[in-house]
Image (spheres, helix red, strand yellow):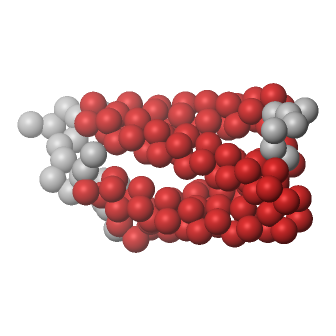
């Protein structure tokens, strides 16, 4: 991973963990221990999926900008589909509170997305290569 990717990861992970902690506390107050467990699982799933997404995009960025964009879009769609599948699969679970899992996953997804956008805007990366060559020029 490049230094920019690590900064982006920290910029998204730290607020997500804080939001996850708040969601776990609220779920514990509302639904008890099972609620706290469900919210914690939701927060951990989101952190794991989105961290893997950043790692995949970082790896694809070494290949080409087109591969990086493809990895970002496909990774996002896959993450959303898997989280929706988990929400559906866990709706009748009795080991933890599925509603707390769902709310924890949604809250942490929003926090991660906002943190990632904020982190990316703070990187001030050029999106055009000033020294790049135009195709067809010598």
Q: Is residue 20 left or right of residue 117?
A: right
Task: Work out which residue is located at the far left of the displayed protein and give it.
Answer: 138
Report x, y in % for residue 36: 76, 57
Q: How many marks?
A: 0
Q: Is residue 73 left or right of residue 19?
A: left
Q: Say which quadrant the C terminus sits in.
A: top left
Say which residue appears at 59% left-offset and 57% top-offset.
Answer: 113
Q: Is residue 117 visible?
A: no
In the displayed structure, would residue 15 be above or below residue 43? below
Q: Is residue 65 left or right of residue 78?
A: left
Report x, y in % for residue 79: 62, 36
Residue 62 falls in image quadrant: top left
Residue 93 falls in image quadrant: top right
Say which residue appears at 34% left-offset and 42% top-offset.
Answer: 58
In the displayed structure, would residue 66 be above or below residue 50? above
Q: Is residue 40 visible?
A: yes
Report x, y in % for residue 9: 42, 56
Residue 21 falls in image quadrant: bottom right
Q: Is residue 8 left or right of residue 26?
A: left
Say which residue appears at 33% left-offset and 56% top-offset.
Answer: 6
Closer to the camera, 41 or 81? 41
Say which residue appears at 58% left-offset and 61% top-offset.
Answer: 16
In the displayed structure, would residue 99 be above or below residue 125? above
Report x, y in % for residue 5: 34, 53
Closer to the camera, 26 or 48? 26
């Amino acid at each position: 991973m490049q230094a920019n990717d690590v900064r982006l990861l920290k910029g998204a992970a730290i607020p997500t963990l804080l939001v996850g902690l708040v969601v776990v506390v609220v779920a514990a107050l509302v639904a008890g221990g099972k609620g706290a467990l469900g919210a914690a699982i939701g927060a951990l799933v989101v952190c794991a999926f989105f961290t893997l997404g950043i790692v995949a995009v970082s790896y694809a960025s070494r290949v080409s900008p087109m591969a990086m964009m493809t990895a970002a879009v496909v990774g996002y769609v896959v993450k959303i589909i898997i989280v929706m599948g988990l929400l559906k699969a866990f709706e009748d679970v009795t080991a933890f509170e599925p509603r707390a899992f769902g709310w924890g996953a949604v809250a942490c997804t929003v926090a991660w997305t906002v943190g990632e956008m904020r982190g990316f805007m703070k990187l001030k990366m050029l999106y055009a290569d000033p020294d790049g060559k135009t195709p067809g020029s010598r």
